[in-house]
Amino acid sequence: MKKIIRKGRLRAFSLLLGLCIMLFSNCQTIPSTAKAVHDFDVDRYLGTWYEIARIDFKYEKDLSYTTATYSKNEDGSIAVLNRGYNKVKDEWKEAEGKAKFVDKTDEAKLKVSFFGPFYAGYNVVALDAEYKYALVAGKNLDYLWILSREKEIPESVKQNYLNVARGIGYDVSRLLWIKQQ
């Protein structure tokens, strides 16, 4: 009987330890080689951004004409509205979420949620002085976006952001260039 209790406690401890490791490893919100923009002015970042390129993933699969619109919520968090056209299903899709700063409000290191209490990293790692173009990194090297206030970006901005992404460790050949016209 004592052996069974001991095995049960060991199993429970192992399960608890595994859960803690999983939870803490999921707390990473930015690739270790990336740095979020400092002196970030969230008010200037608000509004609509066109998605110029992304590393594709299941929630944006088959979407074009994609935009992200950010506004402030009363509680200080950021309302997120992502929108895109699914050419396969011939329909527009929308996803509403919320973003919060991870640390300081002047550091562009945020976490965003579209599914209740589950958050993922949203990190602006490059941003021009006029807040017209942004390079956004997710929590790891599987998530990357190039955003613009306009439907196109200058080639010089594109090349600069591709170089920044490569420096972080992204495989930029995985980028999907989004139809906006």
Image (cartoon, rainbow, N blue to C red):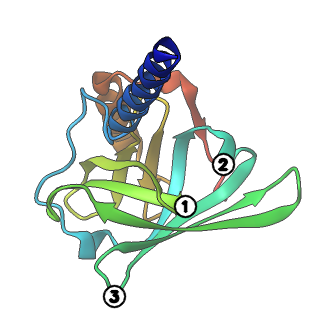
| Distance from Cα at disc 3 to Cα at disc 1 | 18 Å
Q: Earlier in the sequence, mark 1 or mark 2?
A: 2
Identify the residue position indicated by label 1 in the image: 114
Identify the residue position indicated by label 2 in the image: 59
Tag 1 near tag 2, CB within 8 Å = yes
Check the image and report above or below for 105 versus 28.
below
Q: Earlier in the sequence, mark 3 or mark 1?
A: 3
| Distance from Cα at disc 2 to Cα at disc 3 | 27 Å
Return the residue nearer the eye: 109 or 178: 109
The residue carrying pointer 1 sits among few (fewer than 14), some (14 to 19) or many (20 or more) residues within 10 Å by Cα, namely some
Q: Residue at x 74, y 60 (%)?
A: 85
Q: Residue at x 17, y 61 (%)?
A: 40
Q: Number of marks in the image?
A: 3
The residue carrying pointer 3 sits among few (fewer than 14), some (14 to 19) or many (20 or more) residues within 10 Å by Cα, namely few
Identify the residue position indicated by label 3 in the image: 74
Return the residue nearer the eye: 54 or 8: 8
Check the image and report above or below for 142 versus 114.
above
Identity of the residue furthest to the bottom in this view: 74
What's under tag 1, amino acid-wise? Phe
Mark 1 secondary-structure assignment? strand
Identity of the residue furthest to the left in this view: 39
Check the image and report above or below for 142 versus 145.
above
What's under tag 3, amino acid-wise? Glu
